Image (cartoon, grey):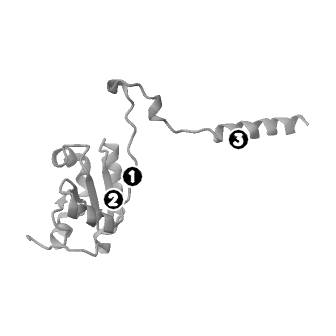
Amino acid sequence: MKKNNKLLILFMSTLLVGCGTNSISNSNLPENTDSQVQLKSAYQKLDQSTAKQNLDTNDAIILVDVRTPEEFEEVRIPNSILLPDYDITKRAPELLPDQDSLIYLYCRSGRRSQEAAERLLDMGYTNVYDIGGIIDWRYETVTGGE
């Protein structure tokens, strides 16, 4: 009987802890902005049709190709800048100085752009979207030195 009681207590404790919430309400943050807690932005995927529409109507979006220089020269989305995924940590502060800029990332298939987006978020960037891979891009592209 004692063993059953211990198991029951363990089960109930686990249930109570597991049902707790980990969310932080902004209403609980102090009014003084100097002491406010900055909540980390989450990874966000954006579908390409929405991305295209936004790119056509918002010149403030920074479109970043995270592929290699060779891939970038072969084909790219117009008005994109090259920032290879392997250089994100080193070159992002130089190429993307405003961490609150609206940034769209793409690569070949979507894997590198997701990793790059997560890395930028870890670095403090707040408005980063992964639009996937150029292999799925149904809109205009340019090649070479165009």
Q: Please identify the quadrant where the N terminus is shown.
A: top right
Q: Amino acid at mark 2?
A: Asp
The tag on residue 130 is 2
> Residue at the spot x=32%, y=73% of the render?
136
Question: Label 1's element?
Answer: loop
Q: CA distance from mark 2 to mark 3?
A: 36 Å
Vertical arrangement, residue 142 with respect to residue 98, above or below: below
Quarter assignment of residue 49: bottom left
In front here: 5 or 45?
Answer: 45
Q: Are marks 1 and 2 in contact (CB under 8 Å)?
A: yes
Query: Can you identify the residue that label 1 sits on?
Result: 43
Please state the horizontal and vertical placement of residue 139, each as a whole percent of the image: 24, 74
In front here: 98 or 84?
Answer: 98
Please state the horizontal and vertical placement of residue 96, each as a whole percent of the image: 19, 47
Question: Label 3's element?
Answer: helix
Vertical arrangement, residue 69 with respect to residue 43, above or below: below
Please state the horizontal and vertical placement of residue 140, each as a whole percent of the image: 20, 74
Crowd band around label 3 with a 10 angstrom C-alpha radius: few (<14), some (14–19), many (20+): few
Precedes in sequence: disc 1 or disc 2: 1
Question: Label 2's element?
Answer: strand
Please state the horizontal and vertical placement of residue 15, each as a whole percent of the image: 70, 41
Query: Can you identify the residue that label 3 sits on?
Result: 15
Q: Amino acid at mark 3?
A: Leu
Precedes in sequence: disc 1 or disc 3: 3
- Horizontal side of 49 relative to 93 (left or right) equals right
Precedes in sequence: disc 2 or disc 3: 3
Q: Are marks 2 and 3 in contact (CB under 8 Å)?
A: no
- Horizontal side of 44 relative to 86 (left or right) equals right
Q: Amino acid at mark 1?
A: Tyr
